[in-house]
Protein backbone atom coordinates (compact mmCIF):
# COMPACT_ATOMS: atom_id res chain seq x y z
CA UNK A 1 0.00 0.00 0.00
CA UNK A 2 1.40 3.42 -0.96
CA UNK A 3 1.98 5.99 1.76
CA UNK A 4 -0.50 8.85 1.83
CA UNK A 5 1.16 12.23 1.47
CA UNK A 6 0.38 14.78 4.18
CA UNK A 7 -2.47 17.06 3.25
CA UNK A 8 -2.65 19.48 6.20
CA UNK A 9 -0.05 21.85 7.60
CA UNK A 10 0.39 23.80 10.82
CA UNK A 11 2.15 27.06 10.07
CA UNK A 12 3.61 29.97 12.00
CA UNK A 13 3.67 33.49 10.54
CA UNK A 14 5.69 36.49 11.59
CA UNK A 15 3.65 39.70 11.50
CA UNK A 16 4.84 43.26 10.84
CA UNK A 17 4.59 44.15 14.53
CA UNK A 18 6.78 41.17 15.50
CA UNK A 19 3.89 39.03 16.72
CA UNK A 20 3.30 35.43 15.65
CA UNK A 21 0.17 33.89 14.15
CA UNK A 22 -0.43 30.14 13.96
CA UNK A 23 -2.96 28.33 11.81
CA UNK A 24 -3.66 25.27 9.69
CA UNK A 25 -4.14 24.93 5.96
CA UNK A 26 -3.77 22.58 3.01
CA UNK A 27 -1.65 25.11 1.08
CA UNK A 28 0.74 27.30 3.11
CA UNK A 29 1.71 29.63 0.25
CA UNK A 30 -1.89 30.28 -0.77
CA UNK A 31 -2.89 30.85 2.85
CA UNK A 32 -0.09 33.40 3.36
CA UNK A 33 -1.23 35.21 0.20
CA UNK A 34 -4.81 35.25 1.50
CA UNK A 35 -3.69 36.63 4.86
CA UNK A 36 -1.61 39.31 3.13
CA UNK A 37 -4.61 40.24 0.97
CA UNK A 38 -6.69 40.85 4.12
CA UNK A 39 -8.76 37.69 3.78
CA UNK A 40 -9.12 35.11 6.49
CA UNK A 41 -8.28 35.63 10.12
CA UNK A 42 -9.25 38.86 11.84
CA UNK A 43 -5.89 38.88 13.63
CA UNK A 44 -3.91 39.00 10.38
CA UNK A 45 -6.07 41.81 9.04
CA UNK A 46 -4.92 43.94 11.99
CA UNK A 47 -1.36 42.51 12.15
CA UNK A 48 -0.05 42.24 8.58
CA UNK A 49 1.82 38.95 8.08
CA UNK A 50 5.30 39.24 6.56
CA UNK A 51 6.48 35.68 6.11
CA UNK A 52 6.10 32.05 7.04
CA UNK A 53 8.53 31.21 9.84
CA UNK A 54 7.87 27.47 9.85
CA UNK A 55 5.40 24.77 8.90
CA UNK A 56 4.91 21.08 9.57
CA UNK A 57 2.86 18.53 7.64
CA UNK A 58 0.17 16.32 9.18
CA UNK A 59 -1.77 13.44 7.61
CA UNK A 60 -5.24 14.82 8.35
CA UNK A 61 -7.14 17.87 9.57
CA UNK A 62 -7.79 16.42 13.01
CA UNK A 63 -4.11 15.90 13.83
CA UNK A 64 -3.26 19.35 12.43
CA UNK A 65 -5.90 20.95 14.67
CA UNK A 66 -4.51 19.15 17.73
CA UNK A 67 -0.98 20.26 16.87
CA UNK A 68 -2.15 23.85 16.32
CA UNK A 69 -3.75 23.84 19.76
CA UNK A 70 -0.51 22.52 21.30
CA UNK A 71 1.50 25.21 19.50
CA UNK A 72 -0.81 27.98 20.69
CA UNK A 73 -0.37 26.82 24.32
CA UNK A 74 3.39 27.39 24.18
CA UNK A 75 5.04 30.62 25.27
CA UNK A 76 6.36 32.73 22.40
CA UNK A 77 9.97 31.76 23.14
CA UNK A 78 9.16 28.07 22.48
CA UNK A 79 6.95 28.36 19.41
CA UNK A 80 9.77 28.03 16.83
CA UNK A 81 11.23 25.06 18.71
CA UNK A 82 7.89 23.28 18.16
CA UNK A 83 8.90 22.86 14.51
CA UNK A 84 12.32 21.30 15.18
CA UNK A 85 12.65 17.64 14.07
CA UNK A 86 13.13 16.29 17.61
CA UNK A 87 9.75 17.80 18.58
CA UNK A 88 7.83 15.64 16.06
CA UNK A 89 6.06 13.83 18.88
CA UNK A 90 4.36 17.01 20.12
Image (tube, helix red, strand yellow):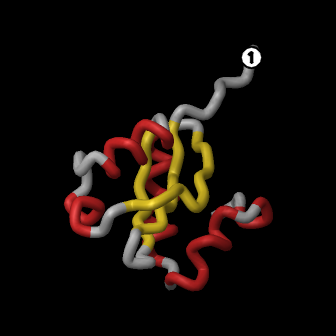
Q: Position of residue 10 (x, y in %)?
A: 51, 52
**Residue drawn at the location 66% of the way across and 62% of the way down:** 83
Q: Residues within 10 Å of mark 1 (few under 14, many from 20)?
A: few
Compared across the picture, whether 56 is left or right of 24 comes to right
Q: Position of residue 84 (x, y in %)?
A: 73, 64
How many numbered callouts?
A: 1
Q: Is residue 90 above or below residue 33?
A: below
Q: Position of residue 90 (x, y in %)?
A: 63, 64
Q: Position of residue 33 (x, y in %)?
A: 39, 43
- Residue closer to the observer: 80 or 48: 48
Q: Is residue 31 above or below residue 2?
A: below
> Image quarter for residue 5?
top right
- Residue closer to the observer: 60 or 75: 75
Q: Which residue is outermost to the right?
A: 86
Task: Locate the N terminus by quadrant.
Answer: top right
SS of the residue under disc 1:
loop
- Quickly name the residue at label 1: 2
Q: Is residue 49 above or below residue 58?
A: below
Compared across the picture, whether 15 is left or right of 2 comes to left
**Residue drawn at the location 62% of the way across and 71% of the way down:** 80
**Residue drawn at the location 28% of the way across and 46% of the way down:** 37
- Residue closer to the observer: 25 or 5: 25
**Residue drawn at the location 50% of the way across and 61% of the way down:** 12
Amino acid sequence: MAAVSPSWFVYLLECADGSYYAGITTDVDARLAAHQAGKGARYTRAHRPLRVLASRAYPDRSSALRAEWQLKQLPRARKLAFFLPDQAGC
